[in-house]
Amino acid sequence: ITVNKKDMAEYFTTATLQYKVNQPITMTNNDGNFDITVNVYGGGITGQAEAIRLALSRAMCELDAENRAILKPEGLLTRDPRMVERKKFGQKKARKKFQFSKR
């Protein structure tokens, strides 16, 4: 797997992130069957790894419909819905308030 013209092990240095990226390929028993090139930008390194995992999972389902039954129970076909909460006016951050003074 090549990520942004670098080897995956070079781009994702931790074993956890490498496992996340490889997860859909190993679960569908397609180790070494494909040469995968991925371009990813934006977000952090973990978000990029999870985005690649979702893309590879969807690609495996496009190739073979039987892969869906393997990947769906593991939650690999579900997009992570968490988004940054917006900053509210009259507050310092999204949830943090300005310092309160009684007197």
Image (tube, rainbow, N blue to C red):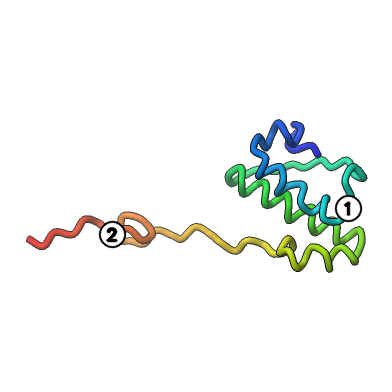
- Please tell me whether residue 40 is drawn above or below residue 57 in the rendered image: above
The C terminus is located in which quarter?
bottom left
Give the Cα separation between the discs numbered 2 and 1.
51 Å
Query: Does 15 sit left or right of 89 as displayed?
Result: right
Query: Does 22 sit left or right of 79 as displayed?
Result: right
Marks 2 and 1, the one that precedes in the sequence: 1
Q: Position of residue 63 (x, y in %)?
A: 91, 58
Binning the other alpha carbons within 10 Å of mark 1 as few (below 14), some (14 to 19) or many (20 upward) gives: few
Residue at (71, 64) in percent of width and height: 75
Badge 2 element: loop
Q: Quadrant of residue 40?
A: top right
Name the mark on residue 29: 1
Residue assigned mark 2: 97
- Looking at this rendering, what residue extends furthest in the left direction? 103
Q: Position of residue 13 (x, y in %)?
A: 66, 34
Binning the other alpha carbons within 10 Å of mark 2 as few (below 14), some (14 to 19) or many (20 upward) gives: few
- Residues 81 and 24: in front is 24
Query: Does 60 sit left or right of 42 as displayed?
Result: right
Tell me if label 2 and label 1 are in contact, CB under 8 Å. Answer: no
Badge 1 element: loop
Residue at (90, 42) in percent of width and height: 32
- Residues 32 and 81: in front is 32
Residue at (89, 50) in percent of width and height: 30
Could you tell me the amino acid type at mark 2? Lys
- From the image, state whether disc 2 or disc 1 is nearer to you: 1
Q: Position of residue 48 (x, y in %)?
A: 65, 46
The N terminus is located in which quarter?
top right
Q: Quadrant of residue 100?
A: bottom left
